[in-house]
Each structure stands twice: as C-alpha cells, then as structure tokens.
Amino acid sequence: MLKRMSLILLVCTFCAHSGEEVLSIDRVVPNSFDLAFPNESNIQPEQSDFSVNNFVLMSNDSGERWAVVTLTNMASGRRSLTNKHLMAIVADGQRIAPLEFLQSFKADETLSLTINFGESKFPLLSIYSRSGK
C-alpha cells in the first residue's frame, strides 16, 4: 500500500511540474542597439552604481519574460541591486521593471543574474540601468 501511495504521489508531482513552460532564448542583443520610443512620463529606474554590460532575452509561450543580465558594480564599496535599479523596454514602447529581487555586489564586482520581468504580450527589447556616473 505504501509503494502504491508513493507511486501516486510521484505521478502527481510530475504532472504538476509538466505544466511549467520551458524558456527559449529570444536573442542576444549587441551593445550598439539603440531604441527611440517616446517616454513622455519620464519613467526611469532609480539611479545606481550599476552598469548593464550585456543581456540575453528569454521568453516562453505563456508570455513570461526573463533575461540573463550581466552587471558591474561601479562603486568602490559594497552595493545592493534591486528591481528598482533596472528597467526593460518592451516592443510596444512601455517601460517595465522586473519582479522584486535583491542581490549584493562587492566593490567592482561583475555578476550575471537571471531576472524575471513578469508576463507581457510584447517581447523585451532592451534592459538598462541609470548610472549616476
């Protein structure tokens, strides 16, 4: 009886995870990629000491938008990166912030982070920060 219950539990667990959508890479964006969507409301990320080096955009058929973003802490001391320090531009020109996260960086440290930007009908086109330097 215990084996049968374990098997049923295992099958139910597999079924629950089988609904998760696999992410596909949309593209790797070159550094020289510029967009000129209007920003009348002046929506910007909070000023920070972080520089976006590059990013790889990903999505799935459910409309989830993710990115692997490589950032550098340009400060001479430890800093914390949050969702308020980054912004993405989507294909309809809107600016969206990622879902909440927190990551500490040492002075001059570079890290690659996988960041969730939620769900959107339109794909991500660019990710940026607003450096005070």
Image (cartoon, rainbow, N blue to C red):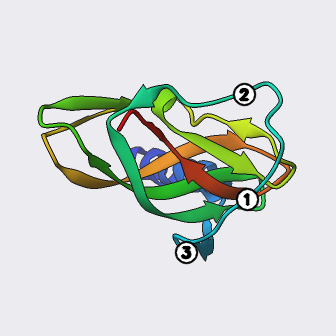
Q: Residues within 10 Å of mark 1 (few under 14, many from 20)?
A: few
Percent from the top left, x then y, of residue 126?
A: 63, 56
- The reply to whether residue 112 is in sight is yes
Q: Number of marks in the image? A: 3
**What's the residue at 76%, 50% (across, down)?**
90
Left or right, 16 with reference to 31: right
Q: Secondary structure at mark 2?
A: loop
Q: Secondary structure at mark 3?
A: loop
Residue 96: quarter of image: top right
**First reached walking from the N terminus: tag 2 or tag 1:** 1
Name the residue type under label 3: Pro
Pointer 1 residue: 35
**What's the residue at 85%, 50% (across, down)?**
121
**What's the residue at 45%, 28% (across, down)?**
47
CA distance separating discs 3 and 2: 25 Å
User: Do the numbered discs 3 and 1 sit on residues whose CB atoms are within 8 Å?
Assistant: no
Pointer 3 residue: 30
Pointer 2 residue: 42
Q: Which numbered disc, 3 or 1, marks the residue closer to the eye?
A: 1
**First reached walking from the N terminus: tag 3 or tag 1:** 3
Percent from the top left, x then y, of residue 123?
A: 76, 57
| Above or below, comparing residue 129 to residue 99 in the picture | below
Closest to the observer, 119 or 2: 119
**What's the residue at 16%, 47% (across, down)?**
108
Name the residue type under label 1: Leu
Name the residue type under label 2: Asn
- The reply to whether residue 82 is in sight is no
Left or right, 48 with reference to 63: left
